[in-house]
Image (tube, rainbow, N blue to C red):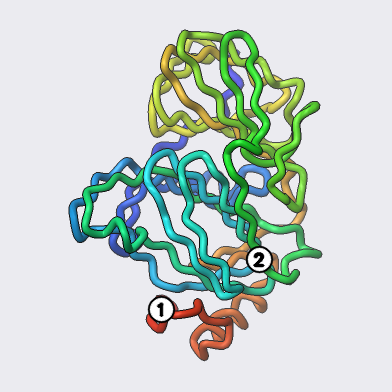
Amino acid sequence: MSNIEFVIEERAADIGNFIVGRLLPVAEKRAVGPFVFIDHMARTELAEGEGLNVLPHPHIGLSTLTYLFEGVIHHKDSLGNSVEIEPGAVNWMTAGKGIVHSEKSPAELMDKKKVLHGMQIWVALPKELEEMEPGFWHIPEKELPRWQEGGLEYKLIAGEISNYKSPVPVHSPLYMIEVKSKKSGTVKIGSKLFGECGIYILEGSVKEANQEFGPQQMLILNDSSQCEFEMGENSTIYVFGGEAFPERRYLFWNFVSSSRDIIEKAKEDWKAQKMGQVPGETEFVPLPK
C-alpha cells in the first residue's frame, strides 16, 4: 500500500528576471511541517552580461534557506552582511520582525558565462519568535553532517535526526536531508523522522509501492515514520519536514505571519521604507498591488 498522499509537480513562476519551478505552497498543501515555500531554481546558463538581479526586498516571520547546486549568488542584507553563496553551503537568514536583502550574481562574474542552479526555501517561525531580532548565518558545506547507509550518501542540511545535528540554527523541530545514489538502493529512514514529510526528486528516480516518480516531482507522505522507498542509480533527492505549527500561517508576497495585522503593518512599513536598507544599494522592489 502506498504511503504517498499526493504528488506535487513544479509550476513555472517568474521572480523578476528569472524563472523558477514553484513547489510550495499549493492549494492541497500550504506547508510541510514548518516549510511554507520552496522554489527550485532550475539549471540556467547565463551569458556574458546576464545574471541574477533580485533587488533589495523585505521578509518577516520566517527563515530563508538558500542552497545551491551550481553557481554563485552574492547575498547582501540590512544587517550589513555581504556573503557569496557557493554550492553545498547553507545561507540561513532569520527575518523575524524584519530584514531586507538582495541576491545577485557577483560583479566579477558578469562578463563571463556562468550557470545558476539551486533551491530557495522558507521556513516559518514559531508564533512566539515571529517578531524576534533578525539574524544571518553562513554554514560551509564541510560543517554539515554526512554519513553512508546501504550504499547511499546522506547529508543533513538543516535540523536534527537521530544522532545527527546540523549547525544551522533552526527555531523548531525539523529536518532537511540530501540523499545521493550512484547505484540503486533502499532508503529506510522512517524511524528517524517525525511530523509531516515530503520528498523532492532533483534528478534520477524514486520507486514506492510499485509506482515510479521522476525529476521535479515532490511526494507528500501520509506517515513520516513509514518513509521507505527505492532510489534509482545516479539520483539525488531531498527529504524534508518536521512538526507543524498549531496556528495557520498567512503569506503575502515575502511576508509570513500567524497574524494578518502584522502583515498589514509590514506592508505599510515597506511602502514607507522603514524596514532598513542594504548598504550601498538604493533601488528596491516595490510592494506588489
In the rendered image, the residue lying farthest to the front is: 108
Mark identifier at residue 96: none
User: What residue do we see at 45% from left, 68% from top?
Assistant: 102
Against 240, residue 276 (above or below) is: below
Q: CA distance from mark 1 to mark 2?
A: 20 Å
**Label located before the other in sequence (1 or 2):** 2
Front residue of this view, candidates 156 and 208? 156
Q: Position of residue 224 (x, y in %)?
A: 69, 27
User: What residue do we see at 75% from left, 25% from top?
Assistant: 192
- How packed mark 1 is, by other alpha carbons closer than 10 Å (few <14, some 14-19, many 20 or more), is some
- Residue 152 falls in which quadrant of the image? top right
Q: Quadrant of the C terminus?
A: bottom left
Against 8, residue 53 (above or below) is: below
Residue under label 1: 284
Is 191 on the left-hand or right-hand side of 282? right
For the residue marked with disc 1, what is the amino acid?
Answer: Phe
Front residue of this view, candidates 170 and 253? 170
Give the label, 1 or 2, closer to the camera.
1
Is 165 on the left-hand or right-hand side of 85? right
Q: Position of residue 241 (x, y in %)?
A: 65, 38
- How packed mark 2 is, by other alpha carbons closer than 10 Å (few <14, some 14-19, many 20 or more), is many
Residue under label 2: 61
SS type, badge 1: loop
In the rendered image, the residue lying farthest to the left is: 48
User: What residue do we see at 47% from left, 25% from top?
Assistant: 236
Total numbered labels placed on residues in the image:
2
Q: Position of residue 85 (x, y in %)?
A: 48, 51
Q: Position of residue 31 (x, y in %)?
A: 60, 48
Is 269 on the left-hand or right-hand side of 202? right
Residue 27 visible in the shown view: no
Residue 42 visible in the shown view: yes
User: What residue do we see at 53% from left, 44% from top?
Assistant: 28
